[in-house]
Image (tube, grey):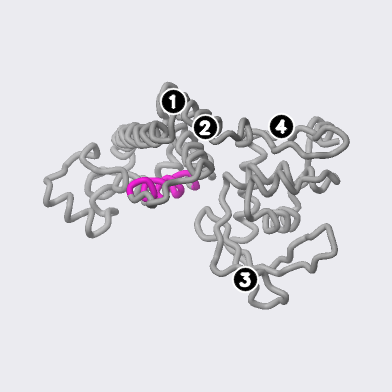
Amino acid sequence: MISKAQIYGEVKQHLDEVTKKLALFLKKILPTLFDDWWTQAVVNVLSFEQQNRLEQRGIRTLEGLDSAGLLRVLDKNWNPISNKLNLPHESRHFVKEMRTIRNNWAHPPVSGFSDDDIYRDLDTMQRFAVVIGADDSLIQAIKSTKNAIHFLSGKGTKMTQPTPIKQNSPAKAQPEISQEKYSGYWNKIISTFSNANIELHTLPQNSREPLWFFVYVDGNYVYVDKAKEHKPSSSLSKPRPLNYNEFEKMYPIYLRRKAGHSVSAEATAASQNQVYWYAIMDYCDLQPLSTGEKNELN
């Protein structure tokens, strides 16, 4: 069986390969967008420290940049690149998360990473690799490591299937929902909270008192924080980001909860933010289902 140390090695190798692919991706697209692409799209968007490093080391090619530099170049030039290639809106989210992943693995905690964290990082890496047109061999290699980490953790298929619920009748399978629908609903959430200061309250299904919380959007992230106007407020100590990956996990669970199923165990395994997700999705009225999806829920 593969060891945790081997998993770490594979993750770092995947990061290196994704970085190389990103350099090729930028090398191909940037010259089509800028006359003096090196100055306009690379040098001018790097941080002061990165510009100094460029000058000191005489770097004149994208291959000379590290992953942090390449991801910054992609992020700062995202609008013209995405417009040129007609990339889906949620792709920007993967770019943002890749910058966080790069930083985390460049400076790992002494305690290491949890299996769930490694899996999520690999999942984002796989999606990002698709965005930049990575070879299928790299994408399959990342998938293989994803499978290895969740089997190593002894969680079976927990990461790709809901945790079984102990009840008298068998648990219903999650409905198959198209990527187009996920993307559309995520865009609706971003749009809803982008231009308004909105406070919502949780939607407990028992006698607990609902708690209010504040929702706002920054870039491609939805944030929740303590309520400013209503009481009682949630006890969040700092703003908490909610991302697209969590949304994909929580939306089917939300639908099953609305249909009357017991989903507490599934929701807890999927996200620590489930109570906020329920309220946000209810407020945005993310309920339309196809006949096939309704049949799978019932």
Task: Residue at 45%, 37% (x, y): give it.
Answer: 125
- State yes or no: discs 1 and 2 in contact (Cβ < 8 Å): no
Task: Residue at 50%, 56% (x, y): give it.
Answer: 219
Mark 1 highlights which residue?
A: 141
Mark 2 highlights which residue?
A: 152
The quarter of the displayed image where residue 289 is located: top right
Mark 3 highlights which residue?
A: 226
Residue type at mark 2 is Leu
Residue 6: where, in percent of width, then height?
39, 31
Distance from the alpha carbon under mark 4 to that under mark 2 = 27 Å
294 shown above or below 42: above
* Residue 61, label in figure: none
- State yes or no: discs 4 and 2 in contact (Cβ < 8 Å): no
- State yes or no: discs 4 and 1 in contact (Cβ < 8 Å): no
Stretch of the chain drawn in magenta: 93-106
Of circles 1 and 2, which is in front?
A: 2
Label 3 vs 2, first from the N-terminus:
2
Distance from the alpha carbon under mark 4 to that under mark 1 = 25 Å
Residue type at mark 4 is Glu
